Image (spheres, rainbow, N blue to C red):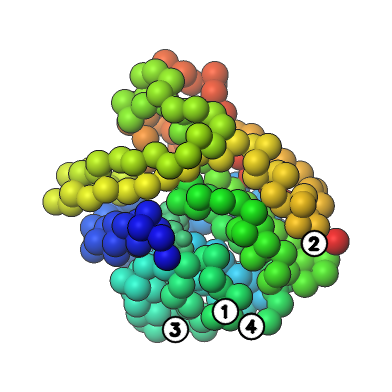
Amino acid sequence: MNQFIEANRHAWDIRLEAHKNSDFYDVEGWKNGKTSLTDIELHELGDVSGKKLLHLQCHFGQDTLSWARLGAKVTGCDFSTESIAYARQLAHEAGLKARFVCCNVYDLPQHLKGKYDIVFTSFGVIGWLPDLEPWAAVIAHFLKKGGVFYLAEFHPVVWMLDDKMEFIKYAYHNDGVIESEMTGTYADRYADLKYKEYGWNHSLGEVLNALLRHGLQLEFFNEYPYSPFDCFDKTVRGADGNYRIQGLEGKIPMVYSLRAVKR
Ligand SMILES: C[S@@+](CC[C@H](N)C(=O)[O-])C[C@H]1O[C@@H](n2cnc3c(N)ncnc32)[C@H](O)[C@@H]1O
C-alpha cells in the first residue's frame, strides 16, 4: 500500500467509533429492520434474491447486510480492519449470513475466489482510489459473464466545490491527489477527530471509459439533482426528503448511478 492509501486506511479506522454511534448511520434503526439502502439503488438494482453479490468498499457492512436481508448471498470488502470487525459483529447480531474480506480493493483477487452475479459499490467510494483502471479490472475479474455491475456515487461536479460549497476550488478532471486536513467526519461533524486524508476527483468519462475498456457494457447512466444523504455543507432538505445545496437547488447534479453488464 502506498502512503496515501495507508493514511486513508488509518482515517477510516479512527472514524468507525463515531460512525457506529451516529444518527447518520442510525445503527439502532437498522438493527430494528430499517434498510440503509436508498430508493435509488433499491429501484435500479432490483431483485437480488438468491444472487451472489460482492460489495466493494462496504465500510461496516450496513448496506451489504441490507442486501442480505433482501435475499442476496453477500460478500463485503473494505480495507479498514475496524470496519470489517464491526461488520462481522453486526452480521452475527442480526443473524445474517455474510462474508467480509479485509483488504485494499485493488488486491481483492489475491484474497477472494469465485465469480459473482452482482458487483455493487456506492456513495463515497471511487474518490479514495487513485486509478480506476485496476478498479475496473477487479470488477470485471469477479463478475460472471452476464453479471451486473452497479454504482451509485456522488457526482464529480459536487467534488469541484470547496468545503463550504461556495465556489469552484478543484478541477473536474483527475488532477492528481488532493490532501485534506480533516476534523470530525461527515457522519458527525463534532466528533473529536483530527486526521489527513487523500482523495482523487474522477470525471464521468474516466469512470465510463475504465468500465468499457474492461468489457462492461453500459445499460443505463442516471444523474440526480439531489443527494439522499446529508453529508455536505449548506444543505436544505426538500419535501422529497433529499438534500440540495442552498442557492444551487436544481442547478447541479449531485449523484449519478450506472448499471453495466459483463460481456
Ligand atoms: C463512504 S464509505 C462507502 C460505503 C457506504 N456508502 C457507507 O457510507 O457506508 C467508503 C469506504 O471505502 C473504504 N475504502 C477506501 N479506500 C479503500 C481501498 N483502497 N480499499 C478498500 N476499501 C477502501 C473505506 O474504508 C470506507 O469504508
- Reply above or below: 151 against 263: above
Q: Which residue is mark 2?
A: 262
Task: Report the mark closest to the observer, 1 or 3.
Answer: 1
Left/right placement of residue 242 relative to residue 81 reads right
State the separation of the CA atoms marked 3 and 4: 24 Å
Residue depicted at 49% across the width and 27% down the height? 171
Which quarter of the figure has residue 25? bottom left
Residues at discs 1 and 3 in contact (Cβ within 8 Å): no
Q: Secondary structure at mark 4?
A: loop
Q: Which mark is residue 95?
A: 3
Identify the residue position indicated by label 4 in the image. 113
The secondary structure type at the circle numbered 1 is helix
Q: Which residue is mark 1?
A: 110
Instruction: Point out residue 84 in the picture as x, y percentages from the top left corner.
Output: 39, 73
Which residue occupies 61% across, 75% down? 109
Most foreground residue, 163 or 28: 163
| Label 4 – label 1 distance at C-alpha | 8 Å
Tell us which disc is closer to us: 2 or 3: 2
**Do the numbered discs 2 and 1 sit on residues whose CB atoms are within 8 Å?**
no
Q: Position of residue 227 (x, y in %)?
A: 49, 37
